[in-house]
Image (spheres, helix red, strand yellow):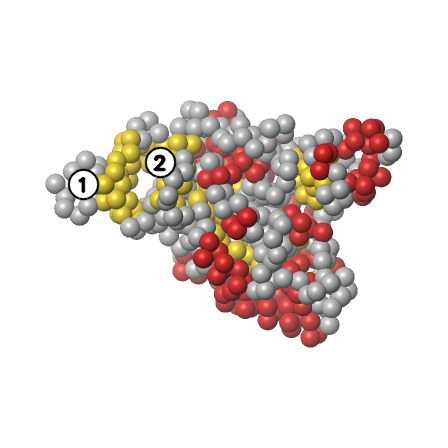
């Protein structure tokens, strides 16, 4: 009998390491928040044993595309994450983040996606609040480019003066010093969309100097998607900054198929040494703020929330317009500020992009929406159920790697994303035969099936246990983790 006692042994499961290797039958021993032993642990003493016979034991999933910045304060149980096996999230995407706060009088419509509470003065203040709140899962944060513009520029709809550019670069550098893993741009939104190459490359050079990265919601995901991908690849090429293309897609039927060209350009850039990766959410509909200019371009638009008309959440824009006796553009104008789901993607194309070697999974969930896109609750289990078990797009081991070790490497999250002795005990136990997303367009907040246990730093978060301190940590970028 071994004398060194373990906190927990997960017994009898099939262990997937997260690196893509084939599953092996092994017990997993946890002590002090880390994986302390692997193999046949029948001779060990442990406080608790968990039967995982017939189940998969995998690294907890890393959601690379979150908008939960303020939710750690507003709705800290984060059940939409834990119930699908997510143990770490990257927040601050699409150019918007919990800090820094705008100068008085500056505002951006997209900030409404984050929630109700005020933003923080800087990333130090944001992280201090997170730490005091104790996050439910681990969190890595990007700083939003829109926030930098709104905090540094008198007129964020203009081009930055030399002083304002320096101020943005200083704020970015301070954010990275505080622990942000990079910065994000939302070039499809204002004021981020005003930015030109020199501004973005200047910021990317600051990030590159600290080994941090740039994630981008590109300027256009429709008619000019190829040029928009090339723009972001060029920023990476010119600055040496690692780059992630967020929620890559080609919107509108006339643009379906263009991902063949965009993925080829990504491969070419990678061959030239540009460090670039991408992510998707596994659905054919997108979601963001309601944009009246899109109302006539896309047939199927579903309203997710509306400040002046909360009763319209969940209804189709066309039906609302018919009831009101106006056209869809006018109805959209009356609903704003509001959010929407746009059905304008091709499922086959989403699947093709997902299969790319450097494609990760990001939920892009919007937990503040009254009637959210189902990706909030179901992205990771949808991959396991529909893409792996039903469609057999790739092996379970390869899919888990895209959701664990690959994002840990891309975002520099040391000790995360794998089942190995010494790694942090972020673990999901699920049934490969039944795991499935249950959230739908009609009922978007249903938890997934088949996810039996989720541990964050060795502490069970799903199903939730009463009176357990929230175990998440703030994850700061580690350049060594890239090795
Ligand atoms: Zn986005």
Give the quarter of the figure containing the C terminus.
bottom left
Camera-nearest residue between 139 and 166: 139
**Where is 123 relative to 189, above or below?**
below
Left or right of 139 in this view: 312: right
Left or right of 74 in this view: 83: left
The residue identified by callout 1 is 45
Query: Looking at the rendering, which quadrant does residue 286 occupy?
Result: top right
Residue 405 appears in the figure: no
**Where is 409 relative to 210, above or below?**
above
**Where is 129 relative to 399, above or below?**
below
Camera-nearest residue between 131 and 480: 131
**Where is 201 relative to 79, above or below?**
below
In the rendered structure, are the residues bearing label 1 and label 2 in contact, judged by CB atoms less than 8 Å apart? Answer: no
Camera-nearest label, 1 or 2:
1
Query: What residue is shown at x 70% (from left), y 47% (from top)?
Result: 226
Query: Looking at the rendering, which quadrant does residue 482 occupy?
Result: bottom left
Q: Which secondary structure lies at badge 2?
A: strand
Query: What residue is shown at x 74% (from left), y 59% (from top)?
Result: 194
Query: What residue is shown at x 70% (from left), y 41% (from top)?
Result: 339
Query: What residue is shown at x 64% (from left), y 72% (from top)?
Result: 167
CA gap between label 1 and label 2 equals: 20 Å
Camera-nearest residue between 240 and 58: 58
Give residue 64's position: percent from left, percent from top.
52, 47
* Residue lying furthest bottom: 163
Give the quarter of the figure containing the N terminus.
top left
Give residue 288's position: percent from left, percent from top.
68, 43
* Residue lying furthest left: 1
The residue identified by callout 2 is 57
Give residue 60's position: percent from left, percent from top.
41, 42
């Amino acid at each position: 009998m071994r004398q060194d006692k373990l906190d927990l042994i997960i017994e009898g499961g099939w262990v997937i390491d997260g690196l893509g290797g084939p599953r092996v039958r092994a017990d997993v021993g946890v002590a002090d928040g880390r994986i302390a032993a692997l193999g046949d642990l029948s001779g060990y003493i442990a406080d608790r044993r968990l039967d995982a016979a017939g189940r998969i034991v995998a690294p907890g999933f890393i959601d690379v595309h979150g908008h939960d910045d303020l939710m750690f304060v507003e709705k800290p149980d984060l059940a939409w994450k834990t119930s699908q096996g997510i143990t770490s999230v990257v927040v601050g995407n699409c150019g918007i983040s919990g800090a820094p706060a705008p100068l008085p009088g500056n505002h951006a419509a997209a900030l409404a996606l984050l929630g109700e509470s005020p933003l923080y003065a800087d990333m130090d203040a944001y992280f201090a609040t997170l730490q005091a709140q104790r996050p439910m899962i681990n969190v890595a944060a990007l700083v939003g480019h829109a926030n930098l513009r709104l905090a540094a520029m008198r007129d964020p709809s203009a081009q930055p003066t030399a002083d304002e550019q320096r101020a943005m670069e200083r704020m970015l550098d301070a954010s990275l010093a505080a622990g942000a893993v990079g910065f994000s741009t939302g070039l499809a939104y204002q004021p981020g969309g005003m930015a030109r190459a020199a501004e973005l490359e200047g910021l990317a050079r600051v990030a590159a100097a600290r080994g941090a990265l740039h994630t981008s919601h590109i300027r256009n995901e429709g008619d000019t998607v190829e040029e928009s991908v090339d723009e972001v690849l060029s920023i990476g090429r010119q600055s040496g900054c690692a780059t992630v293309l967020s929620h890559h897609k080609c919107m509108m039927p006339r643009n379906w198929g263009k991902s063949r060209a965009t993925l080829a350009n990504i491969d070419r850039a990678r061959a030239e040494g540009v460090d670039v990766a991408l992510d998707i959410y596994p659905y054919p509909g997108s979601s963001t703020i309601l944009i009246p200019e899109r109302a006539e371009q896309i047939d199927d638009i579903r309203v997710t929330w509306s400040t002046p008309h909360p009763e319209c959440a969940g209804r189709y824009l066309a039906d609302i317009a018919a009831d009101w006796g106006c056209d869809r553009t006018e109805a959209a104008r009356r609903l704003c500020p509001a959010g929407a789901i746009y059905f304008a993607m091709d499922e086959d194309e989403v699947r093709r992009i997902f299969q790319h070697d450097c494609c990760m999974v990001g939920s892009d969930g919007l937990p503040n929406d009254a009637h959210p896109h189902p990706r909030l609750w179901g992205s990771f289990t949808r991959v396991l159920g529909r893409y792996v078990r039903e469609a057999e797009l790739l092996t379970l081991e390869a899919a888990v790697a895209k959701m664990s070790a690959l994002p840990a490497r891309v975002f520099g999250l040391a000790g995360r994303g794998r089942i190995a002795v010494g790694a942090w005990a972020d673990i999901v136990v699920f049934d490969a035969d039944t795991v499935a997303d249950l959230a739908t367009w009609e009922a978007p907040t249903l938890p997934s099936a088949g996810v039996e246990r989720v541990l964050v730093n060795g502490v069970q978060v799903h199903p939730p246990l009463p009176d357990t301190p929230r175990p998440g940590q703030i994850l700061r970028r580690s350049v060594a983790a890239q090795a």
